Structure formats: structure tokens, C-alpha cells
Amino acid sequence: MDLDLRLVRYFVAVAEELHFGRAAARLYIAQPSLSAQIRHLEELLGTQLLVRTTRRVELTPAGVLFLAPARQLLAAASEALRAATAPAPVRVATIVDGLDTLPKILREMRRLHPHLDVAQGIAGMPRQLAEVQADRLDVALGRRTRLPVGLAGELVRFDPVRVVMRADSSLAARDPLPVAALGSARWVFGSTEHTPDWVDFVVGFLREAGVDPGPVRCAQVPLSAILEQVSELDGVSAWPVSCPDPGFGLVVRRLVEPTPVFEWELVWRRDTASRPAVTAMRAAARAAADRCGWLDPGLAVTRAAA
């Protein structure tokens, strides 16, 4: 037997109201039509569900047993409908966990588009761009770069880069620090496999200031691995404003001459520009940038030359 969900919904309404008039008003149908539909359901089931008198409506023992699974059936149908018609989740990634750029954008997303779910991942920008090209990500979020054909991007943040070191380091007494003063420091980088673009960015601004960082000592993600190596090696590492507080025993110092700025870019496929996931993320990124002052012209002035 294929149960008509409409009949089941009618029964549940009468069972909850124990009154045909109130149930009919709740369902926006005429009372005689509701009575006829309940009788039809009982005929289909081959059992009486309700006892009707001029004064009251009561559930029969069969009606009592039928009510709970009937409610479950309606709930399951509603969930199936919601799953089938709900917008696809926004697929987005960022370069490393712990940075605050994506969380602040997603906070704006929840405010502007509370109905949209988000599927979030972590990947270096080269991999993210490949995933966007393959339509396995709706948007990428990472370092601004020359984009492959078919992709479009929008600058969302200037992120001044500082340096993290041990609090007892001889360099910690200076704030700000000229980049050239870090020539003899032991540098710790991110993962060349995971975020080669970040490593290239750091090596680039160091060499621009005449600093040879020596062998690239790589830490694996998460950020805690970089901080552990900074502490153990008495080293230093680039630490953008978007990074969290490094914690006990470590300090962050500003960099000057130059003050490097990491440029965050949101990237999508040109042929998906009108997709709700893309338009929602772009709107959320702009809102976050406005709220947090990420694109303040004063920050742009401090950028290192490309």
C-alpha cells in the first residue's frame, strides 16, 4: 500500500486537535472534506483510527499506535524535500587553518545568507586554483597571483606581514624591525609542498631587502608546527596580521623597510560568476573587507614592490 502523505497529514492534524473543526481550519480545508478524507484513509488501512461523537473525537487503539509513526513519516518526508531542494553548499578552501580571513568572511556569509551551508577545506593556492578549474571548489582564497585563463579574481585584503620570534631573542628588543636586520636570523617557513606560493612570497621580500634566508627550513601545517620550530631553533618566521597570537614565550614584531603585505584574493571560474555560491562569497568578502578595513589605502602604501 502506498500511503498518501496528504491523508497522513490530515490524520495527524485531527489527532492533535481532537476536533474536526479546528483541524480543518489549521489545514485550510472544509470540515466535510476533512471528514471524508479521514474515512478514506481508514478504508485504505482497513481499520478505524478515530471515534467521532457529537461532543468529542478520540483516538482508537489503532489510532494511538498509528500516530507516532505517522508523525515520523511526515518528518522524514519534510527532510527529504528539504535535502532535495536545499541550495548546494558553498565549496571553499583557504591556505592554512588558523588564519582569520576566511572565518571573518564566513561570519558575514552567515549574516547575509543564513540559508547557505559551507563545505570548507584547506589547500595551498596552486591546488585551490586547480580545484576551481575542475569545478570541485566554487571559490579559492589565497595569495593574489596571475590567474589561469578562465578564472577571475577580486582583491579582498591587504595583510601586513610581521615576524614572530622567541621573547628572549636578541632581536625582540626592537620594534619595528628593518627586514635587513634579520639577515643572520634562522628562518622557518611553511611547507613548500603545501604552500609554495607563501614560501616564494617570504623569500621574495627577504631578497628584495638584501637578506639571504639560507636553506629553506620547512615546517608542516598547522601553524603550531611553525611556532614549535621557531621556539626550538631560536628562529623567526613571517607572521601576518591574520595569524593568531603565538602564545607564551613568543612575540610578534612589525617589519619595515619594506613592510611586506600579503594580498588575499577570492577566485572563481568566469563561467560560474552568477552561481549563488560565488555571488554570496563575493558579497560576504566585500562586507568583511568593509567591516574590518582590510582594503584601507594606508595599508596599500606599505606594500613591498612586486
Image (cartoon, helix red, strand yellow):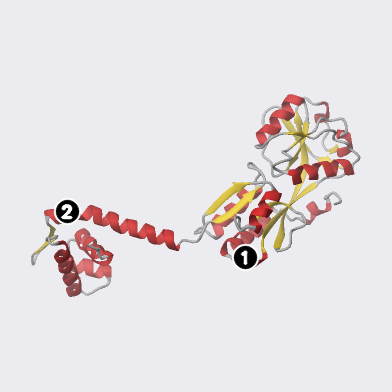
What's the mark number on residue 130?
A: none
Residue 99: percent from left, percent from top: 66, 44
Rendered residue at 72%/43% (across/down): 195
Residue 91: percent from left, percent from top: 58, 54
- Looking at the picture, which amino acid does disc 1 mark? Thr
What's the mark number on residue 64?
A: 2
Rendered residue at 70%/64% (across/down): 150
Measured along the vertical axis of the image, is residue 42 above or below residue 195? below
- Looking at the picture, which amino acid does disc 2 mark? Val
Earlier in the chain: of badge 2 and badge 1, it is 2
Number of other residues with Cα within 10 Å of mark 2, as a class: few under 14, some 14 to 19, many 20 or more:
some
What's the mark number on residue 272?
A: 1
User: Is label 2 in a helix, a strand or a loop?
Assistant: helix
Residue 256: percent from left, percent from top: 85, 42
Measured along the vertical axis of the image, is residue 191 above or below residue 306? above
Rendered residue at 44%/63% (across/down): 85
In what quadrant of the picture does the N terminus appear?
Answer: bottom left
Number of other residues with Cα within 10 Å of mark 1, as a class: few under 14, some 14 to 19, many 20 or more:
some
